Image (cartoon, rainbow, N blue to C red):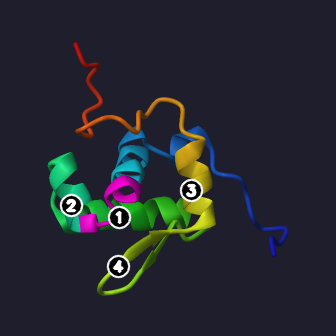
Amino acid sequence: MIDGSYQMPSPQDLSIRQLQYLVAVAETLGFRRAAERCHVSQPTLSAQIRELEGVLGVQLFERTRRRVAVTRAGEALVRGRAPCSSRSTTCSTRPSA
C-alpha cells in the first residue's frame, strides 16, 4: 500500500546506466553474467540494482543463491524502457556505428 509519504521518482533519480544494468540482469538472469556483459564488477552492478530498487520502492528481482527471477515490477520496467535496446551486447552508452 502506498502511504502519503511516497513520492514518484524523478528522472534525475534514475540513471541510464542503472537501466542498462537492469536490462542486462533481466536478459541473462544472472548478476555475474550481466556484470561481465556490462564490463563492471558484480558488486558494483548489484549495488546499482539495489539503489534503483530503493529509488523506485519496488523489488525488481527475486534472488536466491541459485537463481534470479524478474518480478512483475522488473518486467514492466524492462518492457517500458525506450532508450535501451534488448538486443544490445554491451552496456555502453555510446551509439553503435
Gap in angstroms between the C-alphas marked 4 and 2: 12 Å
Amino acid under label 4? Arg
Q: Earlier in the sequence, mark 4 or mark 1?
A: 1
Label 2 secondary element: helix
| Residue at 30% from the left image edge and 30% from the top image edge | 93
Gap in angstroms between the C-alphas marked 3 and 2: 19 Å
- Write down the residue under mark 4: 67
Q: Quadrant of the C terminus?
A: top left
Amino acid under label 1? Leu
Where in the figure is residue 14, as x and y percent of width and height? 50, 46
Question: In terms of image quadrants, where is residue 48?
Answer: bottom left
Residue lying farthest to the bottom in this orientation: 65
- Write down the residue under mark 2: 33
Question: In terms of image quadrants, where is residue 10?
Answer: top right
Looking at the image, residue 28 lies above or below residue 94: below
| Residue at 81% from the left image edge and 76% from the top image edge | 1
| Residue at 53% from the left image edge and 40% from the top image edge | 12
Q: Are marks 2 and 1 in contact (CB under 8 Å)?
A: yes
Q: Are marks 4 and 1 in contact (CB under 8 Å)?
A: yes
Label 1 secondary element: loop
Give the magenta part as a residue range. 25-31
- Write down the residue under mark 3: 75
Looking at the image, residue 82 lies above or below residue 67: above
Q: How many marks?
A: 4
Gap in angstroms between the C-alphas marked 3 and 4: 16 Å
Query: What main secondary structure does the magenta stretch of the protein show?
Result: helix
